[in-house]
Amino acid sequence: MKQRITFVHTSNGDFHPKQLNVSSNSFQVKALKAAREEQLTFLSQELLQEVFSHLLPVENILIVFLDIASLEAMLRAAFEMAFRPALSFNRPFPIQDLPRLAHLVHSHAKSLGATFIDTRDRSSSPFSPPTYHYHEFLPSLKDFGVYVQNKLCVDGDHECPAAAARLEKAIYLDIDYKAKSRELILTSFHLEPPVSGPWTERIELPPKSVKAEVGVFTPEEAIEPEELSLGGFSSIVGEDTKPKPTRFSFASRHQPLPSTSGSAFLTTFPSPTGLHPIIRLTFPTPISPPAPACTLHTYLTLPSRLFVDKYQLSSPNFLASNNLRAIRSLNGETDLEAPDWVIQKWGSTLLLELAPPAPGQAMPKTADESWHADIPLHLRYLPPAAGGTTSIDVVWPVVFWACPADEETKLDGNPFDRVNLGYEAMFGPQMVFYHLRPMPEGSGGRLVERVRVPVMDLEGMRWVEGGTVGMMVLGALWVVWKLLRVSWRKMQSKDLRTEKKVQ
């Protein structure tokens, strides 16, 4: 097993090398205010058969857990900054094994075989193997942390159980299996320690089968605009007796947008939402692309209760009136008439290109007249609820500039890179994403909008049911009365004809 622990502190912090203590059998940090990324790499022979049997038929698996309540703070860290909670993998994979695989992360997972959606780009690669994607709100990683302690950590390694226990407080967790190298990689991120205060801990010398590497870095000014640069100290526990000065730069696929380019946006649902809610993306400050060739996009993850009408968004005039340019990708449930209780898939994903004002074009200066883009959604028929309304949780969209990079730029050399986030596969491999920062308001920093939508009122259903039955009974009586009246008239007419014949 390999273990990599990376601390990243701000350049204006009060860090001093004396806060690090390296000996022949340990690495110690004292009162370190920093973000922390921890990565555990397991080889196939180190995994129990119970775990490896789930992974053997799969080409690649990526499971991502994200604590949405802490995303706003994480965007200010030095690691990647645009995330999507998801589970995705590439075929070949037996669909019947999906519930077993999902149980590794989610003990309450049910039959997921029919709920995954295929997110591959059929237009550019129609014969490529399907890439399945699943999204769900997961309450906690506590059960998975216990599973890692019991099934993956080796005897004698005291750091692995501690790392597994910290998963419950992680801001994000990536579980990545690579079939070619037969490696299972777990990567977790903490913005601060699980307990209050700075990081103070001692990383002991692991068993011989485990290699532990620790680094403490701070972001530095990079030479190229698409690069990130880190400088600080690193050490291999048990091999080094003092921290080694280290500095390295690498091209990053995901970048924070410079503040001069208008780097923030706000997501709202204008009231009343009704049966056709609208997601409004508001940009309070003028925005400009990092480069002339960049295009502005947004990526939405919608639950099954909401859907997009692709025919509505195919009208150029309608798109222009809402500051939209075109649908670039739409996957998942798009049935316009199906009620929610017959939908099997978890929802849908949408990649939209926005139509911002051209560079140099004047924008409104008041906050109430800021430039915004409206994305129309539609509500499915939902089960009735008490009070006549129900709530739907919608994750904030991701908004980014997609900018082509030079052919010489190597974007696969980032040791902290996070891929398969849901949208980058829809662009070319030489694409850099500059992300706009979300600005949540009044939601405790949670990038989730809870929308109230109308449904049938359970309390009023009794009157509706009684009225419906009453109208059906009255209608039936009216039909019977009409039939009896016609029969009565025929009988009277027949009697009159009989009397006339007798006379």
Image (tube, grey):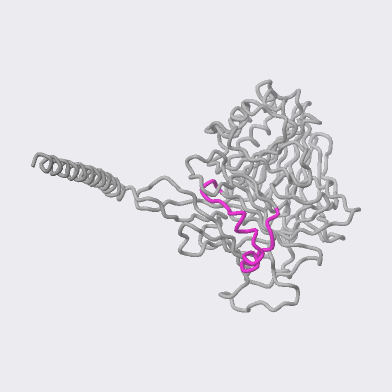
Quadrant assignment for the C terminus: top left
Residue 347: name its quadrant.
top right
**Residue reaching furthest left?**
503
Residue 500 coordinates in the image, percent (x, y) = 12, 43
- In this rendering, the answer to whether 252 lies above or below 133 is below
- In this rendering, the answer to whether 360 lies above or below 354 is below
Residue 364: name its quadrant.
bottom right
Residue 198 coordinates in the image, percent (x, y) = 64, 50
Quadrant assignment for the N terminus: top right
Given residues 429 and 12, the one toward you in this image is 429
**Residue reaching furthest top?**
49
Residues rendered magenta in the picture: 303-328
Residue 143 coordinates in the image, percent (x, y) = 56, 33
Given residues 199 and 404, the one toward you in this image is 404
**Is 352 positioned to the left or the right of 4 in the image?**
left
Q: Residue at x 76, y 44 (%)?
A: 21
**Is 400 positioned to the left or the right of 109 in the image?**
right
Residue 295 coordinates in the image, percent (x, y) = 75, 62
Q: Residue at x 69, y 68 (%)?
A: 356
Magenta-span inclusion, residue 2: no
Magenta-span inclusion, residue 316: yes
Number of marks in the rendered image: 0
Given residues 446 and 267, the one toward you in this image is 267
